[in-house]
């Protein structure tokens, strides 16, 4: 929990361990059966003292794949599995979606589903992007997948060591040693390291001599790469179905690390019957490529060289809120239940879903909006649902309206009016109109006291008809906004 006077910031979700703590365990963790985010579950306490906890699913702890699949994504996983089984020549597939759309949840549950029929690996590369070169992560995961056959694992490990020595001038001493630890060898440096140190001491003459030797060594190095890929191919082709390695959080890595990982897969791991699934936000990865190679780089074309297919995680959106199978309303209800909230008649879930659709909230933003509702005592559900979603989606406008900024209220009216133009049923229309009316009153600099808000509008906003001048309703809205002045992340 951090913050400045007058505002509290709560961060919900995985909290990364310090790098210093991760370094000592990273490569041992690579050899575990699977990897998941090592985050702690962040717990916050609302004004009532009730703990608010958003649990996360580690893929190695999932016992029933797609349990609680309120978005009906198991069918997508089964479709993708059927497609993977046809990729006997190997491939690199991108699973694309914006941040906060449930990519990681889907990837972990899909990986668990695949375990019953495939050799499957899962790497959260964001956890390990402090490593100088991603070859380490990829080689260690392949070795883990082959561990059931000691001879195969040993051969793969030996070839990875040799390839690590070939790559060593690019990787640096520390990374080469880490490659050795990841595949079960304590020290790779040996004579090679001594020669590098001597060359560094002798300066330019030694460097020129080293370059000459490297040119002469080129053919042997190429054979080393081929030998590694040959051993990797033999391992993968021995499986009845493709070996699958899911790489998650690629778009969150350091740009140079993300780009290098793509290049390592292409150069060293592109073999038949081995399929990589890159879980990412494609737009962010394109930005990362430009960050590495320059703003003028045709990043889309460059990225296309590494990907055989990009699939976008589907988003189910609909204004038919009263249909029994409305996906987003179901997800909102699911999140509310996780907070042990009894949403009688689905009232709060309905109001929140109007703004989920109206403001196009991501799944993560939905979770934040729900959290906002329990940082206060849930009441005035129509007004609370709007303000919680508005606070998450348009925090700057929210703050400005709370400070009695008439211009901000006018901007909010335009946003709400846009939603009004898209709503699809009479109940939602009445609700959005009531919110618009309240904002229009907040936009007025001076209320004479004669302005009124209809009983129908107050009934939908507060749950019952409220009498009194409009000034009181605006004051009540700002009071609730003050209580909701949290940054929930």
Image (cartoon, rainbow, N blue to C red):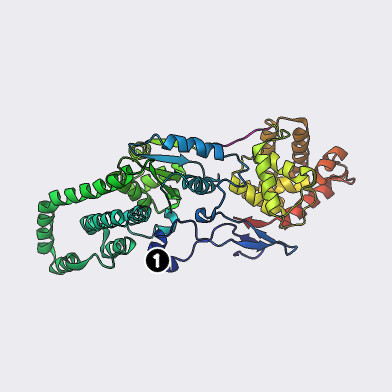
According to the image, label 1 marks what residue? Answer: 23
Q: Residue at x 46, y 50 (%)?
A: 249
- In the rendered image, the quadrant that contains the C terminus is bottom right
Does 433 sit left or right of 359 as displayed? right
Q: Position of residue 134 (x, y in %)?
A: 34, 54
- In the rendered image, the quadrant that contains the N terminus is bottom right
Does 213 sit left or right of 406 as displayed? left
Location of residue 73 (image quadrant) = top right
Span shown in magenta: 313-319
Q: Is residue 488 above or below residue 446?
A: below
Query: Residue lying farthest right?
Result: 467
Dominant secondary-structure state across the stretch colored magenta? loop
What is the secondary structure assignment of the residue under circle 1?
Answer: helix
Residue 403: tell me if it is visible. Answer: no
Q: Residue at x 47, y 40 (%)?
A: 96
Does 394 sit left or right of 222 as displayed? right
């Amino acid at each position: 929990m951090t913050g400045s006077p007058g505002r509290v910031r709560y961060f919900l979700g995985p909290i990364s361990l310090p790098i210093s703590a991760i370094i000592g365990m990273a490569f041992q963790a690579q050899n575990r059966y699977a990897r998941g985010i090592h985050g702690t579950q962040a717990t916050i306490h609302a004004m009532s003292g009730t703990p608010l906890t958003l649990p996360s699913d580690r893929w190695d702890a999932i016992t029933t794949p797609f349990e609680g699949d309120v978005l009906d994504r198991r069918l997508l996983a089964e479709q993708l599995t059927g497609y993977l089984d046809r990729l006997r020549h190997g491939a690199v597939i991108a699973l694309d979606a914006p941040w906060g759309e449930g990519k990681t949840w889907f990837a972990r549950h899909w990986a668990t589903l695949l375990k019953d029929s495939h050799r499957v690996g899962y790497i959260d590369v964001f956890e390990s992007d402090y490593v100088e070169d991603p070859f380490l992560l990829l080689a260690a995961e392949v070795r883990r997948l082959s561990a059931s056959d000691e001879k195969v694992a040993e051969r793969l490990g030996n070839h990875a060591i040799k390839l690590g020595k070939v790559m060593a001038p690019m990787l640096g001493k520390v990374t080469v040693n880490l490659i050795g630890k990841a595949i079960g060898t304590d020290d790779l440096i040996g004579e090679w390291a001594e020669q590098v140190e001597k060359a560094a001491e002798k300066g330019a003459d030694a460097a020129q001599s080293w370059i000459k030797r490297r040119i002469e060594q080129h053919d042997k190095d190429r054979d080393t790469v081929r030998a590694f890929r040959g051993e990797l191919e033999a391992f993968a082709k021995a499986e009845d179905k493709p070996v699958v390695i899911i790489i998650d959080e690629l778009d969150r890595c350091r740009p140079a690390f993300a780009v290098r990982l793509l290049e390592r897969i292409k150069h060293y791991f592109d073999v038949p019957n081995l399929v990589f699934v890159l879980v990412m936000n494609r737009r962010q990865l394109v930005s990362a490529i430009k960050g590495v190679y320059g703003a003028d780089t045709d990043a889309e074309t460059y990225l296309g060289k590494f990907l055989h297919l990009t699939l976008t995680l589907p988003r189910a959106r609909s204004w038919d809120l009263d249909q029994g199978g409305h996906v987003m309303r179901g997800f909102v209800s699911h999140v509310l239940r996780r907070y042990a909230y009894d949403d009688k008649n689905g009232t709060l879930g309905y109001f929140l879903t109007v703004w989920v659709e109206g403001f196009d909230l991501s799944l993560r933003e939905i979770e934040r909006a729900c959290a906002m509702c329990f940082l206060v005592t849930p009441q005035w559900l129509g007004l609370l649902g709007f303000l919680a979603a508005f606070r998450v989606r348009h925090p700057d406008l929210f703050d400005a309206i709370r400070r009695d900024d008439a211009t901000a209220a006018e901007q909010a009216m335009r946003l709400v009016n846009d939603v009004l133009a898209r709503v699809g049923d009479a109940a939602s229309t009445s609700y959005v109109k009531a919110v618009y009316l309240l904002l229009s009153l907040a936009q007025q600099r001076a209320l004479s006291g004669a302005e009124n808000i209809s009983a129908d509008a107050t009934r939908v906003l507060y749950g019952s008809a409220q009498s009194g001048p409009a000034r009181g309703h605006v004051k009540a809205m700002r009071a609730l906004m003050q209580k909701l002045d949290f940054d929930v992340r």
